[in-house]
Image (tube, rainbow, N blue to C red):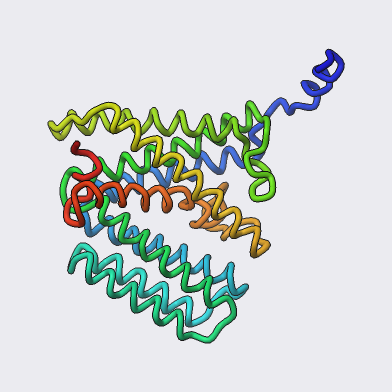
Amino acid sequence: MTEEKTSEKSANRPLWPFGSDLLPRLLSAVVLIPLTAIALIAGWLPFALLVALVMAGAYREWETMISGEHKGWPAALMMGLLALAALAHPMNGAWTAAIIIAVAVAAGAVIAAPNRGWRIAGIAYFGLVTMAFLAIRGSSGAGIWAGLFLVSVTWLTDSGAYFVGRIVGGTKLSPDVSPSKTWSGAAGGLVSGTIGGLIVWFIAGWALDAPSPFIIGLLIAVIVSIAGQAGDLAESAIKRRFAVKDSGDIIPGHGGLMDRIDSLTMAALILWCIGLAHRGLGAVPQGILFW
């Protein structure tokens, strides 16, 4: 690159690369992070109530996005069933929640509407995510740490990708899906998310008197961070398919609930699978943390 081109590129780079959405993002984080932490610590049922509200709200945005309608009884029905599944999980077990979700999927299949396949996919996805969140939290103290591990990796991945991508810039990660994302941001998010996850991993091992190998924590943090970024890209692709910029406007700086939890939902599913594969349905938090 010639000296002239280098000077021109430097001159065109904005002095403040973060745009006007940085302050709303920070204010939203000030509210959302303590709320999530309080729900995790308060217990399985309070956490289930938070999950019920979030999943119902996210599905409403999904229904609006795929149908173009802001309200209607199909959306209300599915929202109610997802919320019921979330509350049933800690009170009556995972199988009860699974049955309710299956009923919701069946109901979505018989309701005559355009984009029926997308509706079924949304119900199934948010239903599985509901079960994943609640299985990761569980009823034990290990569930608090497993939940903190999940949100630390995911949210620090998002933050690292945002700041590094805005500061460094460079080659676009997937310009056809999400023009603002860069490979530098993806790498920065992976590093920050992994470091954050490892910090929680070591603190959890000390607090629970059950330290696990560094390499296991490193691998899980990397996998969860990548899954979170994949979830973000997947939602961007779906929004592009339905020609919408944001899934909603409930959270300043982030758009809708789906925009805020897109990374978290995919990461939760992957982390749930890890816990299930290692220790089984009744010990997911232990399956995540104890090796």
Q: In which quarter of the image is residue 37?
A: top left
Q: In which quarter of the image is the N terminus?
A: top right
Task: Give the residue drawn at x 22%, y 59%.
Answer: 45
Q: In which quarter of the image is the C terminus?
A: top left
> Is 279 left or right of 13, judged from the image as shown?
left
User: Where in the figure is residue 267, as x and y percent of width and height?
Assistant: 40, 47
User: Where in the figure is residue 163, as x and y percent of width and height?
Assistant: 57, 31
Q: In which quarter of the image is residue 80?
A: bottom left
Task: Give the residue drawn at x 47%, y 33%.
Answer: 190
User: Where in the figure is residue 68, as x and y percent of width and height?
Assistant: 62, 73
User: Where in the figure is residue 133, as x and y percent of width and height?
Assistant: 32, 54
The residue at the far top in this view is 3
Counting every numbered tag in the picture gives 0
Q: In which quarter of the image is residue 104?
A: bottom left
105, above or below 29, in the image? below
Task: Give the residue drawn at x 32%, y 39%.
Answer: 149
> Is 178 left or right of 1, judged from the image as shown?
left
Task: Give the residue drawn at x 77%, y 21%.
Answer: 10
The residue at the far right in this view is 4
> Is 1 left or right of 97, judged from the image as shown?
right
Q: Which of 82 and 256 is in front in this view?
A: 82
> Is 136 left or right of 104, judged from the image as shown?
left
The residue at the far front in this view is 277
